[in-house]
Image (spheres, helix red, strand yellow):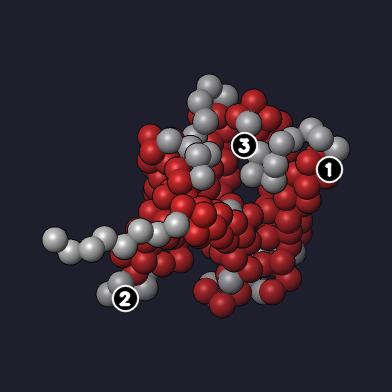
């Protein structure tokens, strides 16, 4: 009988924490929007910075401020009841950013990306009013489909790996159940499909 290799629990937890932090919504959406000048003709670096700043930068700074004041438990806002005001404030910030981008004559493709993020945000907000859906998983699925699915040959597999690794980390750390992770993946896929209908 072959010997089994046991991986220390602490090491697994550390890997899960690293995956959770590097695949956090602010990180993935920030990367998505900051890369738009390279991915989409007509999108300038100013457009990308403004989009990322108002979509994830300001909301994340707000979360850090609330955490410092003891209004939220952690920077991932693990308590479901604390999420609705933050998601609503994030939606407002996205709206302000979109108005600024209109004034900057940003191309329609950038509004499509922001619109997809906004749709995903609204889906997560609606679900989290009654149930703790995994926002990490929703964003990982959405960003994975946008950035990785178009990659030739291995793109869809890479997108699936990103979503799966993120979901695994959330379950491993005890922040979500497998059902909450799968629901997050579904929300991200729905947001991606809806974004395809935007200009």
Q: At 52% across and 31% down in the image, what residue appears?
A: 132
Secondary structure of residue under mark 1: helix
Q: Could you say which is closer to the camera, residue 33 or residue 112? A: 33
Which label sits on residue 170? none
Q: Give the x, y percent position of residue 9.
A: 46, 52
Quadrant in the rendering for residue 53:
bottom right
Decide if residue 143 is on the left or right side of residue 49. left
- For the residues marked 3 and 1, what is the alpha-carbon distance in whole angstroms? 15 Å
Decide if residue 16 is on the left or right side of residue 61. left
Mark in the foreground, 2 or 1: 1
Which label sits on residue 68? 1
Q: At 14% across and 61% down in the image, what residue appears?
A: 1
Mark in the foreground, 3 or 2: 3
- For the residues marked 3 and 2, what is the alpha-carbon distance in whole angstroms? 36 Å
For marks 3 and 2 on the same chain, the one whose residue lies earlier in the sequence: 3
Decide if residue 14 is on the left or right side of residue 155. right
In this orientation, does residue 49 appear? yes
Q: Are marks 3 and 1 in contact (CB under 8 Å)?
A: no
Secondary structure of residue under mark 2: loop
Say which residue label 2 marks. Answer: 152
- For the residues marked 2 and 1, what is the alpha-carbon distance in whole angstroms? 44 Å
Which label sits on residue 78? 3
Q: Residues within 10 Å of mark 3 (few under 14, many from 20)?
A: some
For marks 2 and 1 on the same chain, the one whose residue lies earlier in the sequence: 1
């Amino acid at each position: 009988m072959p010997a089994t290799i046991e991986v220390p629990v602490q090491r697994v937890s550390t890997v899960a924490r690293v995956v959770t932090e590097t695949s956090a919504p602010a990180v993935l959406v920030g990367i998505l929007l900051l890369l738009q000048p390279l991915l989409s003709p007509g999108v300038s670096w100013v457009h990308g910075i403004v989009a990322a700043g108002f979509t994830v930068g300001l909301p994340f700074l707000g979360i850090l401020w609330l955490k410092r004041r003891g209004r939220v438990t952690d920077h991932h806002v693990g308590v479901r009841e604390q999420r609705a005001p933050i998601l609503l404030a994030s939606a407002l910030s996205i709206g302000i950013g979109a108005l600024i981008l209109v004034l900057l004559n940003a191309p329609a493709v950038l509004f499509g990306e922001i619109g997809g993020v906004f749709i995903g945000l609204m889906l997560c907000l609606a679900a989290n009013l009654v149930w703790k859906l995994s926002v990490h998983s929703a964003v990982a699925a959405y960003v994975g489909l946008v950035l990785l699915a178009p990659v030739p040959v291995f793109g869809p597999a890479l997108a699936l790996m990103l979503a799966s690794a993120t979901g695994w980390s959330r379950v491993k750390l005890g922040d979500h159940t497998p059902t909450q992770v799968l629901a997050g993946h579904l929300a991200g896929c729905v947001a991606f499909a809806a974004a395809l209908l935007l200009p």
